[in-house]
Image: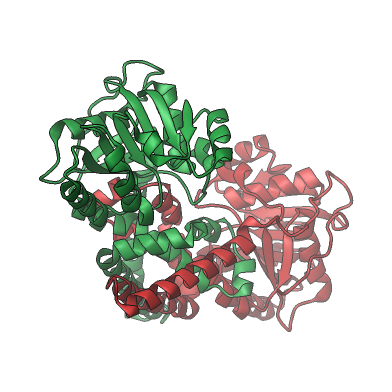
Chain colours: A red, B green
Amino acid sequence: MAVHRLCIVGLGMMGGAIGMAARRTGAAMRVIGVVHNQNSIQIARQKGAVDDATVDLRTGVQDADLVVLCVPVRTILEAAATLIPACHEDTVITDIGSTKALIVHEAEALISRMKAKVHFIGSHPITGSEKKGIDAAEQVQLVGAPCVITPTPHTDNEAYRTVEEFWKALGLRTLRLAPDEHDAVLARSSHLPHLLAAALVSMQTPRSLDISGPGLRDMTRLAAGDPAMWSDIAAQNAPELSKALKELGQELLRLANEVEVLGMQGTPGAEAARERIFRFLVDARQRHEDRFLRPAKPVAPPAEASEPGTAVEDPPQGQ
Amino acid sequence: MAVHRLCIVGLGMMGGAIGMAARRTGAAMRVIGVVHNQNSIQIARQKGAVDDATVDLRTGVQDADLVVLCVPVRTILEAAATLIPACHEDTVITDIGSTKALIVHEAEALISRMKAKVHFIGSHPITGSEKKGIDAAEQVQLVGAPCVITPTPHTDNEAYRTVEEFWKALGLRTLRLAPDEHDAVLARSSHLPHLLAAALVSMQTPRSLDISGPGLRDMTRLAAGDPAMWSDIAAQNAPELSKALKELGQELLRLANEVEVLGMQGTPGAEAARERIFRFLVDARQRHEDRFLRPAKPVAPPAEASEPGTAVEDPPQGQ
């Protein structure tokens, strides 16, 4: 069933993309945006991201069935605390933050302390780019992107279904993970790569930066991300991120030794090292190819303005 | 002055791209390709990469003013040894291998041993992709790409100018570095990123690979490169590559500690760590932006079929 009234808090790149897709697919009958200033109201309307928008958080969430928090991770809980008292009973609230354990547990605690009759379920659609702002919204590829939903033992089933159906109606491939599991997985696949891109560009000399090609450019693209946002994400997922950094750091030291041996050309050690490095590269290529170069898993795109939640095949979950 | 007769040995992605550009810009009056088999002759002609092609290396280089070796680094010296006796006096030979010190020094030694009256000067146009084959040639961006030329104390000035003018006529931005310096720079900006992409994809779990977005995809793109070719490059540049791997590995271990402290939220240590990580990310973003997001340095594109070597401004060198 389509959401009657969807409220999107924060109309940056992701909030804008979600608003546009919700209106285009009919996943929501009416989309209300909450923005920073009067100017942004006009822009959000012109972009087709909302039916209407307001600068007042409490006004925005009034009568909403579903609220999607598209603000930086640092301010999600603050926004939740402000808007929860203004929600009607059974409003479902989700967010799109890149970390989940802290946010989900604190939000549940908040609702319990406030004795509010609303539901909070964490989400994380994994798409977008290092860009910011609603102007980048149209480039966001939602269809086919993974979206992790992170229920807890306290999660209401019907509320979960509302969130799941919403993302599916937008064409995302939903998966279910515990908040802690989400953070462990994303430390590896997303948070580590961001710090790695920064470390890689930082270790370049002026000359090596100048004499570089498309490879270095692509491998350091994530370094263009927002420093404050990524500092916050690192803080919220510190133990898992630290573990992943250590693992990769040690692997690079191992490779450094391997390459050193490889350089002793003509020795039997060098021959063996070459064989191991060759194997390592073959395996890596295979893993990359299997994930990124094969035809995508079959996820039907959302039908234009059709019954949402039915146009999309139930994807295999929890892989 | 345009090259009268250019011979390109190896018509893969790069050889194909160079042939097409040489014909399009008029940088060479006649382009002869040397390919593996009869089939490829037809394909190379159809693609517009050559005027004519042959499977015989010695026939191909006959009467060539300039020979460009576009074969894998492992086979460059072997090809040079075969073709040198078939070249006429003063033929200039260059290559496009990703390592330079070993190749250039061995090629010079070879010419000296053979008492041949030809010139070998190493080149490295830094562009292309992880793809292979002439079908990928059209996507190669030559205009504006850096091209390192690596003369030695033995290099003939006129031969150097021939190589330099050729690359400039194709629109590349030429730079001059000693072969050893080239290898030290490229270890950092290119060879390290290739092994890093492989290490990053290798440390993913099936789940983290599945739950990943465009960031991980782009950061592991180089893992699709040819394993044999990259094993050879690693072997030929082992000391510098090993040094770069060690440096980045140690930096990641340092970041792991920093993030661990960052996670001790509410402590003064965590506050200080956040400030340092924030600064680190700000600096990295700046370096990335300065190199990759600012308008490219002004390099005039080669005029269509005009006098080659004059259409391109002399760029600042050795930066």
Observer-nearest of A200 and B139:
B139
Specify the farthest residue to the top.
B306
Residue B303 in view: yes
Q: Where residue A56 sits in the image (x, y, percent)?
A: 62, 52
Q: Where residue B291 sits in the image (x, y, percent)?
A: 33, 45
Observer-nearest of B122 and A123:
B122
Image quadrant where residue A264 sits: bottom left
Observer-nearest of B23 and A70:
B23
Observer-nearest of A52 and B200:
B200
Q: Residue at x 63, y 67 (%)?
A: B211
Q: Where residue A247 sits in the image (x, y, percent)?
A: 43, 79
- The quadrant in which the N terminus of chain B is found is top left
Specify the farthest residue to the bottom.
A153
Q: Residue at x 67, y 45 (%)?
A: A53
- The quadrant in which the C terminus of chain B is found is top left
Q: How many numbered tags mark residues here?
A: 0
In the picture, measured across the screen, residue B119 lies left or right of residue B127, that is left
- Compared to residue A14, the image places residue A43 above or below, namely above
- Compared to residue B200, the image places residue A1 above or below, namely above
In the picture, measured across the screen, residue A73 lies left or right of residue B266, that is right
Q: Residue at x 36, y 24 (%)?
A: B28
Image quadrant where residue B296 sits: top left
Q: Where residue A61 sits in the image (x, y, percent)?
A: 71, 57
Specify the farthest residue to the left.
B153
Residue B147 in view: no
